[in-house]
């Protein structure tokens, strides 16, 4: 038995077949952030199928993951390496698939669709002239289908509406639930008394359209969220603990006070502690924003989040878990009541306007008709018809339809929107605040100026051999240089990289190792070149700032670094205002002040020192290279670390907001026509069905309008 | 009008059949990767068996 319907689709090979044939669950999931097409699916599945220890592998392109079945608990590292060789970036996924929630919604959608179509057929018969016993018979069948279906399918709306009412708020689900319940109730009464006006089809199509909106929105959001969680999980979760001279891998959570940890050069300090090696240079920019590395002597404090530039070093853990600086920062950020908690979503604001208005009108209709005619039942029928025909359908779809389209476009462009109202808040932003260090700039080694082309290619080959952050920066700086072919390349931990080229020895590493005073140096044969470390803009930083300014956003630069550094960088950036030497609390206060002045601030930052500011701001973005804590604090995470997408994201958010407002306008137009008709007592089930479907379709089409959001 | 006694149950049974088919597809994870399945159609069968 194959999962897929057509024979061509089983070509994922026997792999897919084996996975489908045997219903056991996959044991591993890998995250493949860059896959996007048929060739990627095939490349990944083929590469994995060749590995002997994998029973089956199947790529899920929507979620950019591959599900693998192998021995439970097997180490996926060799598979990740195999995929890297085939050219696919892969990481172990942290979150596991949650099928249940989505399946429940899909099942409800399917049942609502089935019930809607059957009841609609019966209604068509009634509209085309069925009368008397035939009409009643059709109504009874419709009731038998519609009532259980409505109870089951509309349950998500009922429970959400109940939740909102308990908190004494209105959300969109309140009028929706009310319309469904009243439509069913009135129709049942009409059916029992042999009346003509049964609205079963309206109740069901309302449920069906709204469920469709929810399913799509939930899928898109789940994809973005799980990608964001995987990205954050890229931080190492394991450290090496020294026990009787042996290095033992251990989870960060299991490190105890007094444990001795071994850190390689370029590693991030996982817990607070003191240095037990002689002297080390440390990059503390994640905590302070200062771009210059600082020197730490034996016995001095290392803070979680520091990056060890020279190594390897030994440290002793002093504060772990809840007590560490990292944890305290995260807790502070969680406690800080950001602007966003006060934000009411557009849909809820629309509901707050719509509910009193329409319900007031319905009440007025009831009172007016009962005074005018004295017929209470007739007045009640008109009032309920008003509530049904005013169509919360378009209103209910207005936001999810647009949000799905916009979030989906952004997701494919590598912008992960995590929070539900992030797009709306992003659209309202009028000031952009950037953190400098790590977000806009990066510390890089400058290749010496007097190198020949050949020497440059040797330098690049050496830099390629190491994972040290400075080496990786150097590789980027030497982008257009072809690496030379070297023999016998070795990395000496804590010192640098060593290689031979014929008889010549080439080395790249710490100054002390190469007989220099300090810093980093490069040696080829007898020549030794000192290399300067300097702060450079990340690719696209200047363009992004310029583009934001053209779009009319004032750009502020916020940094924990010194005035001079900030001024030098801003000479290249051209931000409107620079604030230097800011502590984390200062950054937060600065944003709070801007917001008190009436601005809506977008904060872009990556460091631990930015988490408070990220939480405080109206909306926040973190680059994918940011620390987990900062990514968690931000609404939006940029995949791949490129800033260029930021301006696009703002543009898309603004257009999405405009579409949502247009949709509200469309819904209002329908109501402007439908309400007078309903109040006049002219509402019929046929009219209700027409209004319901045309408004839903026009709202959806508006959201999907080609080129509308790009 | 007696024809209704046959036709109405007929249409309901057909509808229920479609619903059952939908539930079956749902239970077999056919909605888990809509994008990927759309691309998988492009697999050339001969090609894939060779590789």
Image (tube, rainbow, N blue to C red):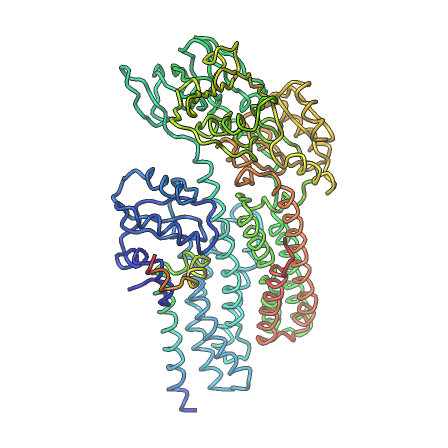
Rendered view: A95 above or below A368:
above
> Can see residue A380?
no
Asked if one can make out residue A527 in the rendered structure from this viewpoint, the answer is yes
Give residue A543's position: percent from left, percent from top. 67, 38
As drawn, which residue projects farthest toward the front?
Answer: A503
Residue in view at x 52 percent, y 37 percent: A624
Whether residue A10 is situated above or below residue A516 in the rendered picture: below
Give the vertical position of A531 relative to A179 (above or below): above
Front-most of A394 and A310?
A310
Task: Relative to A257, say whether A139 is above or below.
Answer: below
Of residues A517 and A331, which is closer to you in this image?
Answer: A517
Is residue A123 shown left or right of residue A702? left
Looking at the image, which is closer to me, A182 or B33? B33
The residue shown at (68%, 18%) is: A564
Q: Position of residue A366 (x, y in %)?
A: 64, 67
Q: Quadrant of residue B44?
A: bottom left
Q: Quick one: A299 or A417, which is closer to the camera?
A: A299
Picture quarter containing residue A445?
top right
Q: Position of residue A67 (x, y in %)?
A: 35, 49
């Amino acid at each position: 038995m194959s999962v897929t319907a057509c024979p061509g689709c089983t070509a994922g090979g026997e792999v897919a077949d084996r996975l489908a044939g045997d219903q056991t669950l996959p044991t591993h999931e890998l995250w493949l952030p860059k896959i996007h097409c048929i060739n990627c699916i095939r490349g990944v599945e083929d590469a994995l199928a060749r590995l002997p220890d994998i029973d089956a592998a199947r790529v899920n392109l929507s979620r950019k993951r591959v599900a693998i079945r192998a021995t439970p608990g097997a180490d996926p590292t060799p598979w990740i390496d195999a995929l890297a060789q085939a050219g696919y970036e892969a990481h172990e996924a942290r979150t596991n698939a949650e099928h249940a929630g989505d399946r429940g919604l899909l099942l409800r959608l399917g049942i609502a669709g089935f019930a809607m179509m059957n009841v609609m057929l019966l209604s068509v018969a009634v509209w085309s002239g069925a009368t008397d016993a035939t009409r009643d018979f059709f109504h009874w069948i419709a009731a038998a289908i519609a009532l259980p279906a409505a109870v089951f399918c509309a349950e998500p709306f009922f429970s959400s509406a109940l939740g909102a009412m308990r908190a004494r708020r209105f959300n969109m689900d309140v009028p929706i639930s009310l319309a469904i319940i009243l439509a069913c109730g009135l129709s049942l009464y009409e059916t029992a008394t042999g009346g003509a006006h049964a609205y079963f089809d309206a109740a069901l199509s309302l449920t069906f359209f709204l469920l469709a909106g929810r399913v799509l929105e939930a899928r898109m959001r789940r994809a973005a969220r799980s990608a964001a969680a995987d990205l954050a999980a890229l931080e190492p979760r394991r450290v090496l603990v020294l026990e009787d001279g042996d290095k033992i891998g251990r989870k960060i959570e299991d490190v105890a006070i007094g444990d001795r940890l071994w850190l390689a050069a370029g590693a991030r300090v996982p817990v607070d502690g003191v240095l037990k090696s002689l002297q080390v240079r440390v990059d503390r920019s994640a905590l302070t924003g200062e771009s210059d590395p600082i020197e730490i002597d034996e016995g001095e404090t290392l803070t979680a989040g520091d990056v060890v530039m020279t190594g390897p070093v030994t440290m002793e853990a002093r504060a772990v878990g809840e007590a560490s600086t990292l944890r305290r920062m995260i807790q502070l950020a969680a406690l800080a009541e950001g602007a966003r908690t006060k934000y009411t979503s557009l849909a809820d604001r629309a509901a707050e306007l719509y509910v009193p208005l329409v319900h007031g009108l319905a009440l007025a209709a009831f009172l007016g008709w009962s005074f005018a005619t004295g017929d209470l039942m007739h007045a009640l029928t008109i009032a309920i018809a008003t509530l049904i025909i005013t169509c919360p359908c378009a209103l209910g779809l207005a936001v999810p339809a647009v949000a799905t389209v916009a979030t989906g476009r952004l997701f494919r462009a590598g912008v992960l929107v995590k929070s539900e109202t992030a797009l709306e808040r992003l659209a309202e932003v009028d000031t952009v605040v950037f953190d400098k260090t790590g977000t806009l700039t990066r510390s890089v080694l400058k290749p010496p100026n007097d190198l020949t082309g050949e020497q440059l290619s040797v330098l690049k080959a050496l830099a390629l051999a190491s994972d040290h952050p400075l080496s990786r920066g150097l590789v980027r700086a030497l982008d257009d240089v072809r690496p030379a072919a070297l023999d016998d390349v070795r990395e000496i931990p804590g010192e640098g990289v060593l290689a031979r080229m014929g008889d010549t020895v080439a080395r790249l590493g710490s100054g002390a190792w190469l007989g220099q005073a300090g810093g980093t140096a490069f040696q080829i044969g007898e020549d030794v070149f000192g290399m300067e470390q300097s702060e450079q803009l990340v690719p696209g930083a200047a363009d992004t700032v310029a583009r934001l300014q053209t779009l009319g956003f004032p750009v502020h630069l916020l940094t924990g670094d010194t005035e001079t550094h900030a001024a030098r960088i801003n000479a290249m950036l051209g931000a409107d205002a620079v604030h230097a030497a800011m502590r984390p609390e200062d950054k937060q206060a600065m944003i709070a002040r801007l917001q008190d002045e009436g601005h809506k601030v977008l904060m872009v930052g990556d460091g631990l020192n930015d988490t408070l500011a990220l939480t405080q701001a109206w909306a926040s973005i973190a680059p994918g290279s940011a620390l987990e804590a900062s990514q968690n604090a931000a609404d939006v995470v940029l995949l791949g670390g490129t800033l260029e997408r930021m301006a696009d994201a703002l543009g898309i958010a603004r257009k999405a907001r405009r579409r949502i407002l247009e949709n509200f306008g469309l819904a209002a137009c329908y109501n402007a026509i439908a309400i007078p008709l309903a109040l006049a007592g002219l509402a019929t089930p046929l009219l209700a069905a027409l209004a319901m479907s045309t408004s839903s379709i026009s709202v959806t089409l508006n959201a999907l309008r080609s080129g509308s959001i790009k | 009008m007696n024809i209704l006694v046959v036709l109405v149950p007929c249409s309901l049974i057909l509808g229920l059949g479609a619903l059952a088919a939908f539930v079956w597809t749902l239970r077999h994870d056919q909605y888990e990767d809509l994008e990927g399945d759309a691309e998988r159609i492009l697999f050339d069968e001969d090609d894939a068996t060779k590789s």
